[in-house]
Image (tube, grey):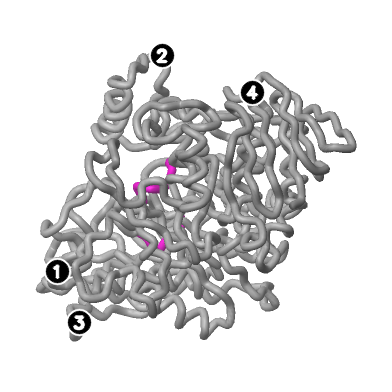
Amino acid sequence: MKADVWAPYATSVTCRTLGEDVPLEQDAGGWWRGPELANGQDYAFVVDGEGPFPDPRSPRQPHGVHGASQAFDTGAFAWTDGDWKGRDARGAVFYELHVGTFTPEGTLDAAAAALPRLADIGIEMVELMPLAPMPGTRGWGYDGVSLYAVYEQYGGPAALQRFVDAAHALGLAVALDVVYNHLGPDGNYLAKFGPYFTDAHHTPWGSAINLDQPGSAQVRRYIVDCALRWFRDFHIDALRIDAVHAFKDDSPQHLLAQLSLETAGLAAALGRPLSLVAESDLNDPAMVTPLRDGGLGQTAQWSDDIHHALHAYLTQEREGLYKAFGSVETLDKAYRKVFVQDGGFSEFRGRNWGFPVPDDMDRRRFVAFAANHDQVGNRAIGDRASATVSPGTQAAALALVLLSPFTPLIFQGDEYGETRPFPFFSDHEGELGKAVTEGRFKEFAGHGWDEGAKVPDPQAEETFRSAILDPEGGSEAIRDWFAQCIALRPHTLEWGAWAAHPVSISEAAPRQLTMTGPVRVHANLSDQPLACEGRPAAVFGEVAVTDSGFTLAPDAVALVIA
């Protein structure tokens, strides 16, 4: 690779490598052209006498977020997945995992060694939480920098290639969570090089990424080239794009539309599907409407409304954002219409919110989940529902997600009833670390939490260690139930299955729930028996079967093929 860098306003740029500063020559478009670098060679840039700074497109950061970059030859890896045909994200069973807590070792190689278990239980798409370099030895990954690199604590870029190759050998696709709406506060040197940020727009993290102001064409290329690199050089199958509602883009072609168009071109060239999965809170079906129909062209998007409706009903929580959810009518609307807030007034937001989803839009374009890193980790103590709800409620949640018309996502450990928490954790130094701790305590103080006793310190190593999974624990009954749900999924994937058996959710009595569909889900979360029609194909808990149907005991769930 060459030590080229975009610095349009600089008057001089040098590349510091092998103990000397090599002057770079300015080219058209604000690019400075540097020397050829050998694989493994350290380098950094000095811009107008300041620095040295890591390369904005650094392929590797072995010396931390403030250290020199290192050349990395992505073509050196000997791939063995030549027969891999890829997998479309729509309808695949997703499994979200955090590399640092998925195994005790906390590395990509250790995670790769654990992949056979996921393949055996029917997972189809493994989604990795962000891998961009971040400060310290632990973190969620959403405050990363050097977006082209892979966190060294996890094993660096070569380890990611090994992980993907191992996954493909097992028939598992790989999705990567990427954060393009902001960079972390520690180790972010982009502004030293050019107009990567703009004060014309603002986000919760400060000045917005520059997508529509002078210089934005190259900033957009920075993001799009990064995305295409994961697909091309690391054989990634899908990207989950974090908080796309934070992209402030008034240009004629939205960044997401550009990314969709160029991803489709690369997919055609590679001969395998490449998917883009947006995280958006806009409740706008335009996100997943094809470009030809005037949409933004994303393959799928997360749907928080489905989660909120399901979580509030099953746990009976009603605080904060759950105020608008919790009734069976709301849950039914989420499953039939996707967005509960689809244009009406949102009390939580204080304004009208969202747009209706067309009835004929493929529901596999919406990702449904009973839990994910946000919905667990952004709770005060990072507690999972499995730590407090009944086994039957856990079973109901799994069935209602896996056998829904949507694309299902399972959060790590929920397939066996993991009860260990997933709290927010980080490893910042000095005043920044102190501010993170204080900010976390302050955030939840108003919610009635005891700062010192209940809200874990995100900077404490024990907070991170409390989240490491225990796959030997959990519940055998939940493991068996997960397998039974997966075994019945083919019925939900048959052509025309949902047209023949439309989805709806109703109650026979309070907390006695039925979801219709190709596979009916009956969940008795009450303290009274529930009489049901048909013959159960799978049962969690106690059931009495007769010639005329069956009766579910309290805290039992049954599945019936329609």
Q: What is the distance, in whole Å, between disc 3 and disc 4 at their CAs?
A: 73 Å
Q: Viewed as shown, does residue 230 lie left or right of 294?
A: right
Magenta-drawn segment = 139-150
Residue occupied by mark 4: 526
Mark 3 vs 4, N-terminal side: 3
Mark 4 vs 1, N-terminal side: 1
Image quarter (top left, top right, bottom left or bottom right) of the N terminus: bottom left
The residue under label 2 is which amino acid type?
Answer: Ala
Q: Residue at x 28, y 21 (%)?
A: 446
The residue under label 4 is which amino acid type?
Answer: Ser
Q: Secondary structure at mark 4?
A: loop
Q: Measured from the top left, where is residue 139 in percent x and y? A: 43, 41
CB within 8 Å, label 3 to label 4? no
Residue occupied by mark 3: 25
Mark 2 vs 1, N-terminal side: 1
Q: Main secondary structure of the magenta part?
A: loop
